[in-house]
Image (spheres, rainbow, N blue to C red):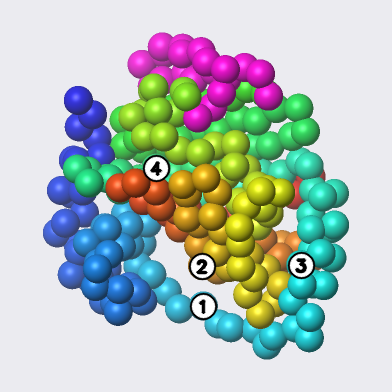
Amino acid sequence: MREGPLSLFTAYAGAGSRLLRGCSESGRTAHMPRTLLLCMLLGACTATRELPPVADPAAAWQARNAKLATLETWRLEGRIGVVTEEDGGSATLHWQQSPQSYEIELFGPFGSGRVRLYGNDTTAVLETSEGEALYAGSAEALFEQGLGWPVPVEPLRRWVLGLSDANDAFELDRQGRLATLTHDRWQVNFLAYRDVEGFDLPRKLAMHTDGLNIKLVVHEWQLHP
């Protein structure tokens, strides 16, 4: 049994009243418990200033995709929170991506220390905080095997850039960016964007599937590091 996420939730409960006042999704009563828990795990929800709409969102989307196609090497630092029917937890996230490989580090209650996940298109390795090494053919399989949650690492690599797969159903916002996306059984909401060296990149994402809720907040981007 994993005790880290439950212990984290207990520790955060005392600060709940302060954080709940900052949450902006108070109208969604049907999903309130999980929404509030994610707010507590990642910090209070904040309002985002809306930009004026572009004349042609579809054309802006095509131009944006062409520009993002040139972005193959990047690094992000942020916070990821996971909530299930039974428990929840969060961790600091460092993600280094290159065309041939990736490295993801998690610090905090997810692994009660530091967890390192790295690999390429054919091999993935997860090093636990106890020094154990796990191997699999995909990062998704290792994430669930080692941490207990099926986080979609491969599609998340696209989502953090605001990109979709060819078979995804999606809706655009008024600036021609992804607003919502459906991938297999995953529903993704792109809650906020920020400009990073001329690239309009997601700052906050919320993902949901079958009793599993994930929220990612990006604090810092480094492009072509």
Q: Is residue 1 left or right of residue 59?
A: left
Residue at which label 1 appears: 48
Residue at which label 2 appears: 191
Q: Is residue 175 magenta?
A: no
Query: Marks 1 and 2: CB-CB under 8 Å?
Result: yes
The local secondary structure at tag 3 comes to helix
Distance between mark 4 and mark 1 Cα atoms: 23 Å
| Image disc number at residue 61 | 3
The local secondary structure at tag 2 comes to strand
Residue at position x 65%, y 83% in the image: 51
Quarter that holds the N terminus: top left
Residue nearer the viewer, 209 or 8: 209
Mark 1 or mark 3: which is in front? 3
Amino acid type, residue under disc 3 in the picture: Trp
Q: Earlier in the sequence, mark 1 or mark 2?
A: 1
Distance between mark 4 and mark 2 Cα atoms: 20 Å
Around disc 1, counting alpha carbons within 10 Å, would you say few (fewer than 14), some (14 to 19), or many (20 or more)? Answer: few
* Range shown magenta: 121-140
Q: Is residue 129 left or right of residue 220?
A: left
Any part of residue 77 in sight = no
| Image disc number at residue 91 | 4
Mark 2 or mark 3: which is in front? 3
- Height in image: 6 above or below 124? below
Residue at position x 16%, y 56% in the image: 13
Q: Position of residue 182 (x, y in %)?
A: 54, 55
Residue nearer the viewer, 222 or 97: 97
Q: Earlier in the sequence, mark 2 or mark 3?
A: 3
Q: Earlier in the sequence, mark 4 or mark 1?
A: 1
Any part of residue 58 in sight = yes
- Height in image: 25 above or below 199? below
Mark 3 or mark 4: which is in front? 3
